[in-house]
Image (spheres, helix red, strand yellow):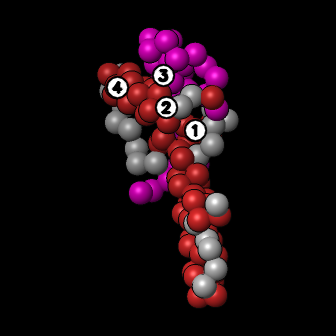
């Protein structure tokens, strides 16, 4: 997916309008992932209704513009954390040591 540096004109206003319509408030960082998805979908509908097609990567640009962590960055960080944990577990397994939390009992 192509990422864009900033959301197109009118997207932040559409997000604010969508949040009001959905009763989500404007604490963008505190929105749960499902609510953020609903907000993005509705904001896209609002802007599409104004005759503008959403470009690829607009969700990440909107997140950055509103001070919300970029979902793509969060996914990358989660993947790195999981890989690091897998590597650590592999080392412990090779040594024959316990590596699962439930095995610590």
Front disc: 3 or 1: 1
Label 2 sits on a secondary structure element that is helix
Report the magenta residues as a range.
Answer: 1-29
CA separation in Å, label 2 and label 3: 13 Å
Q: Nearer the viewer, residue 44 or 92?
A: 92
Q: Nearer the viewer, residue 95 or 18?
A: 95
As drawn, is 25 to the left or to the right of 56?
right
Residue farthest along the bottom direction in this orientation: 94
Point out the tag, 3 or 4, that comes first from the N-terminus.
3
Query: In the image, what residue occupies the spot 63% across and 43% down?
Result: 69
Q: Nearer the viewer, residue 57 or 40?
A: 40
Using a 10 Å C-alpha cutoff, classify the residue at mark 4 as few (fewer than 14 neighbours), some (14 to 19) or many (20 or more): some
Q: Is residue 22 above or below residue 95?
A: above
Residue 63's disc is 1
CA separation in Å, label 3 and label 1: 13 Å
Point out the tag, 2 or 3, that comes first from the N-terminus.
3
Front disc: 2 or 3: 2
Q: Quadrant of residue 1?
A: bottom left
Label 3 sits on a secondary structure element that is helix
Q: Name the residue tied to disc 2.
A: 36
Whether residues under marks 2 and 3 lie with C-beta atoms below 8 angstroms apart, the answer is: no
Q: Is residue 6 above or below residue 96?
A: above
- x, y percent for residue 92: 63, 80
- x, y percent for residue 35: 47, 28
CA separation in Å, label 4 and label 1: 17 Å
Asked if the stretch drawn in magenta spans residue 23, the answer is: yes
Whether residues under marks 4 and 1 lie with C-beta atoms below 8 angstroms apart, the answer is: no
Residue 45's disc is 4
| Whether residue 99 is visible | yes
């Amino acid at each position: 997916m192509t990422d864009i540096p900033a959301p197109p004109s009118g997207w932040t206003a559409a997000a604010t309008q969508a949040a009001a319509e959905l009763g989500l408030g404007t604490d963008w960082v505190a929105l749960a992932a499902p609510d953020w998805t609903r907000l993005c979908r509705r904001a896209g509908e609002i802007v599409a209704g104004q005759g503008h097609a959403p470009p690829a990567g607009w969700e990440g640009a909107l997140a950055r513009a509103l001070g919300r962590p970029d979902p793509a960055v969060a996914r990358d960080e989660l993947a790195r954390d999981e890989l690091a944990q897998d590597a650590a577990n592999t080392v412990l397994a090779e040594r024959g040591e316990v590596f699962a939390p439930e095995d610590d009992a």
